[in-house]
């Protein structure tokens, strides 16, 4: 296996509107550093824009707006990866940005260190789509590529960066990640470090809509607005450039101290951009006051069902809150658009000021989180190798096999405990009254009654026995995983299986559904199904013979032996006594009360003997299969726990 401890990880946040890169090292604990994009974009972040120039080749970022460039593409990130208008600009952009990064950073060139490129994907992209996206990125010339959910990257950024002042305990609970991008605002739940499904708002609630509204507002005011509109209809690339200029002024507005606008309502931020035409130049002026921005945010938007951006965001917050099982422990705002101060204010109004957190640099949070995710993945590889080694060693199977007699004992007790009062005495009375012909018929009837009782949804005795045994097994399993956790600097509890309980007549684990493991069969349901089958086989197969020869029923058989006699040998006498249709008068010898009292007096010892006999039979009927299925279920659950524990590897 290749040593990856010296790997350089590049978190590549390819956003719909902006892109940022951050770098980390697998063998260092320092925080990821945001990379200088230099000529590709000028600083720490640049526009996701690409074009081709006849002499200068592929241009990205603001350089793509140079005159002479053709095929300008902006905001091309999309799940529709088969479309050429998505594939080509993505490939061109990623190849150029990565080549520029390698050229500028000595650690990325010449094979000095292995390099891993980690890209983010919206939470709504499933595993298959993320895999297709990775293949597209490899086609851009990056052999080592990972794609992880952006919500996970945001969570890691909040946990590790120190820029978000948040109690680590909150991050281990229910976290709502709100990622405000140019095209969408994504709401994603993360519970116990496990990403849940995105909360779909069903609306294109992206900050780019604000940019387009500013563009329309400024065109309405511009003396050359009509000429500019005609030009925009002819050339879509010019519209994209002007939207970009509106975005830049919008960002300047929200970075400006609000006190400036409070002191002077006419204070403005703005710029002038010359648009070259065949006949000269047109000048696009942008001037924003606080009143102008308020008007933009409150403009009804057809794409938002006639609501303003601010109103639609508030409604989306309310919908996200309603879609959660309860108040989240934390709400994490990420994305450059989260700098808009009203976003923080509205989010706090819905979830509470003490629950909402915004880092100092939300626009590069995802890039840093992606670099952290890559570092964590490399370090976690050793942890996963340890877990696989444990599962391959069959130590879990040996442990289960050693403890299986204990489960058989519990099952025997579940069957036999209290059966004298519930089944044997009533059956004896029916036999004595002549309603049952032979003792074998009585034993068979008791067997059927026990099975019906144990399979009744209202009767949880069998499930309680299984739960008790499984919970007693948990500390032994933790002893197997404890050395691995210590070696990887994890709390042993990270690999502790959840306690099993009985809920509504079935085995269950008290874990919120959003964080449930992805395995098909939880160990609880595996054991429940297998045990139920074995109990049914045992009761309907050997159960009659066991009941007829052991336990409280043996007291009745002993009475019958007195009538049948012992001269023919014990085995023959027992068979004859069980098969005989004893005369009604003989059945009543000794009196009912006396016989019932004897049954009750000897019930404890006789039921214990019957429980042992049933336990032995359970092991014979299905012990090997039971051990295999339980071991398989435990292995699957440990694998699922390892997926989650990876997020805790530092």
Image: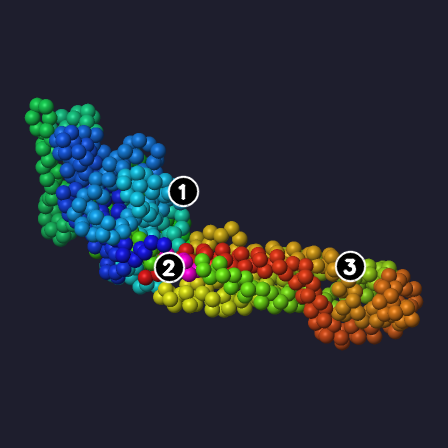
Out of 40 and 413, give the one closest to the viewer. 40
Taking the image as shown, residue 641 lies to the left or right of residue 262, namely: right
Q: Secondary structure at mark 3?
A: helix
Most common SS among magenta residues: helix
Q: Residue at x 14, y 50 (%)?
A: 256
Residue behind mark 3: 445
Q: Is residue 646 rendered magenta in the image?
A: no
Determine which residue is flagged by label 1. Answer: 128
Residue 313, image x, y percentages: 30, 45
Camera-side residue of 555 and 267: 555
Q: Residue at x 9, y 37 (%)?
A: 272
Residue 173, compared with residue 409, is above or below; it is above
Q: Compute the Cα span from label 1 to label 3.
A: 55 Å
Marks 3, 2: nearer the viewer = 2
Q: Which residues are magenta?
A: 381-387
Q: Position of residue 433 (x, y in %)?
A: 86, 63
What label does residue 351 carry, if any? none
Q: Residue 108 versus residue 183: which sits nearer the camera?
A: 108
């Amino acid at each position: 296996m290749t040593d990856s401890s010296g790997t350089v990880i590049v978190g590549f946040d390819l956003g719909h509107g902006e892109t940022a890169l951050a770098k980390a090292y697998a063998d260092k604990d320092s925080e990821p550093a945001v990379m200088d994009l230099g000529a590709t974009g000028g600083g720490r972040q640049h526009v996701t824009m690409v074009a081709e120039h006849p002499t200068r080749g592929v241009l990205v970022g603001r350089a793509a707006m140079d005159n002479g460039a053709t095929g300008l593409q902006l905001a091309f990130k999309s799940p529709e990866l088969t479309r050429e208008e998505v594939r080509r600009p993505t490939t061109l952009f990623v190849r150029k940005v990565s080549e520029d990064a390698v050229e500028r950073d000595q650690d990325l060139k010449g094979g000095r260190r292995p390099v891993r490129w980690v890209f983010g994907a919206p939470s709504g992209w499933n595993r298959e789509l993320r895999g297709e996206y990775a293949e597209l990125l490899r086609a851009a010339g990056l052999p080592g590529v990972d794609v992880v959910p952006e919500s996970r990257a945001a969570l890691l950024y909040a946990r590790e960066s120190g820029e978000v002042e948040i109690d680590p305990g909150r991050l281990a609970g229910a976290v709502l990640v709100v990622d405000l991008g140019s095209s969408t605002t994504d709401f994603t739940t993360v519970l116990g470090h496990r990403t849940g499904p995105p909360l779909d708002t069903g609306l294109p609630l992206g900050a780019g809509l604000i940019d387009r509204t500013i563009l329309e507002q400024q065109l309405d005011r511009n003396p050359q607005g009509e000429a500019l509109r005609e030009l925009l209809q002819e050339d879509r690339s010019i519209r994209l450039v002007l939207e970009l200029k509106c975005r830049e002024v919008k960002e300047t507005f929200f970075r400006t101290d609000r006190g400036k606008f409070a002191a002077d309502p006419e204070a403005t931020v703005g710029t002038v951009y010359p648009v070259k035409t065949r006949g000269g130049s047109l000048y696009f002026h942008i001037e924003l006051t606080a009143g102008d921005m308020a008007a933009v945010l409150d403009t009804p938007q057809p794409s938002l069902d006639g609501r303003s951006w601010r109103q639609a965001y508030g409604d989306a917050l309310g919908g996200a809150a309603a879609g959660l099982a309860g108040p989240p422990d934390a709400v994490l705002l990420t994305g450059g658009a989260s700098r808009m101060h009203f976003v923080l204010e509205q989010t706090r109004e819905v979830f509470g000021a003490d629950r909402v957190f915004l880092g100092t640099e939300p626009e590069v949070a995802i890039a840093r989180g992606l670099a952290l995710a890559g570092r964590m993945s490399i370090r976690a590889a050793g942890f996963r190798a340890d877990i696989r080694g444990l599962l391959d060693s069959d130590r879990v199977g040996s442990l289960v096999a050693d403890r299986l007699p204990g489960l058989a004992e519990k099952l025997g007790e579940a069957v036999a405990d209290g059966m004298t009062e519930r089944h044997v005495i009533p059956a004896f009375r029916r036999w004595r009254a002549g309603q049952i012909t032979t003792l074998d018929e009585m034993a068979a009837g008791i067997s059927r009654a026990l099975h019906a009782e144990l399979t009744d949804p209202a009767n949880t005795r069998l499930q309680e026995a299984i739960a008790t045994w499984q919970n007693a097994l948990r500390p032994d399993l933790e002893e197997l995983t404890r050395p691995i956790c210590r070696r990887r600097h994890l709390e042993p509890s990270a690999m502790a299986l959840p306690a099993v309980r009985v809920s509504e007549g079935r085995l269950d684990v008290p874990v919120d559904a959003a964080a449930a493991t992805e395995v098909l069969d939880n160990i609880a349901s595996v054991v429940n199904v297998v045990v139920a089958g074995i109990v049914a086989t045992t009761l309907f197969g050997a159960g009659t013979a066991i009941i007829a020869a052991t336990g409280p029923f043996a007291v009745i058989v002993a009475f019958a032996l007195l009538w049948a006699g012992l001269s023919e040998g014990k085995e023959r006498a027992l068979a004859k006594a069980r098969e005989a249709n004893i005369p009604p008068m003989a059945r009543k010898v000794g009196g009912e009360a006396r016989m019932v009292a004897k049954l009750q007096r000897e019930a404890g010892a006789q039921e214990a003997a019957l429980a042992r006999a049933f336990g032995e039979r359970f092991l014979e009927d299905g012990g090997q299969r039971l051990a295999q299925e339980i071991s398989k279920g435990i292995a699957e659950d440990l694998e699922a726990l390892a997926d989650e524990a990876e997020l805790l590897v530092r």
